[in-house]
Image (tube, helix red, strand yellow):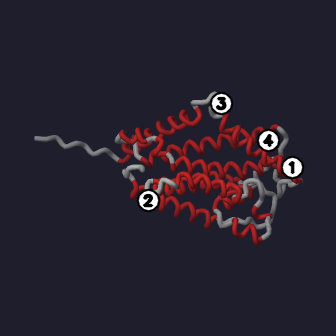
Amino acid sequence: MTQAVPTPSVSSALTVQGRVIYALAMREVHTLYGNTRLGYLWAIIQTAFNIAVFWGMREFLGAHAPHGMGMAVFMLCGFIPWYMFSDTAVRCMTAVRANQALLTFPQVTELDLMIARLIVVWGTQLLCAGILLSIGVALGEPVELRHLESLAATLFVAPLLGWGVGLIFASLARFWTTLERLVPILMRFLFFASGLFFQVSELPARFSEPLLYNPVAQIIEWQRYGFSASCAPPMYSIGYILVWCFVSISLGLLLERYARGREIK
């Protein structure tokens, strides 16, 4: 008489999956930052360098941060959401190709690899933001958080949007490998069209209206509103941003399920 094999409970399955994702995230941290002497400092230096370059350009042109914000806060509110979005999207797209060997373990799925990269990028940029903002305060930069809920929401939706877009890119790249070379070009275009180093709402309507179709530009506008002293109505739509997140994640999960297990060309 054969003995029935007990079916694992949902809680135990989630516990195992959580441990797998944690292990993958720790591996990603070591892979991305453990092989250099600077380690995690490299992520901070990269963000600080980009901020310093565009800060210098604005100072040279005599452009000041709008609505009572300090320049450090103004620039951080552009670059941190951007890196949360773009790094998540690009690293999710390449997650499967870079970790093919791990998929031989039955506990590891392609979705786990992407979730682990999402967590690492999100945590890294939060750490960068905290350190750079602290340095700005120490140097006397004005920092006044007026709408905490705006800051918290944008730090949540920016990586989610990047994850959804990354899922779509990762799935389509299995059928069209050229996409991996085209995505960096698209990201470079979005870099200059998302308002990282300028205020989209300060532009004339003929320029600002097309740019605000870009959900990343709206997320940046939303985050800057958290530090803004202006009483003017903000130029972003929470509903528009959430629809982009929902549609991209839903479509990405459907495409990921369709493409799962197919051999990467």
State which tag comes first along the sequence, 4 or 2: 4
Q: Specify the amino acid type for callout 3.
A: Leu
Q: Residue furthest top?
A: 37
Q: Nearer the viewer, residue 217 or 183?
A: 183
At mark 4, the secondary structure is helix
Mark 4 and mark 1: Cα distance apart in space: 16 Å
Which tag, 2 or 1, sits closer to the chain's start?
1
- Lower position in the chain sequence, tag 4 or tag 3: 3
Going from N to C along the chain, the mark reached first, 2 or 3, is 3
Q: Report the amino acid beneath label 2.
A: Leu
| Residue annotated with mark 2 | 255
Residue 38 - label: 3
Residue 177: where, in percent of width, then height? 48, 53
Residue 108, how many percent across, how many down? Answer: 40, 42
- Separation of residues labelled 2 and 1 (CA atoms): 45 Å
- Answer whether labels 4 and 2 touch (C-beta < 8 Å): no
Residue 15 visible from this viewpoint: no
- Residue 228 left/right relative to 19: right
Disc 4 residue type? Gly
Q: Residue at x 58, y 63 (%)?
A: 242
Q: Nearer the viewer, mark 4 or mark 2?
A: 2
Q: Residues within 10 Å of mark 2 (few under 14, many from 20)?
A: some
**How busy is the neighbourhood of tag 1: few (under 14 within 10 Å), some, or many (20 plus)?**
few
Residue 49 seen from this side: yes
Does 31 appear above or below 91?
Answer: above
Residue 88 point in image, percent of width and height: 57, 49
- Nearer the observer, disc 4 or disc 3? 3
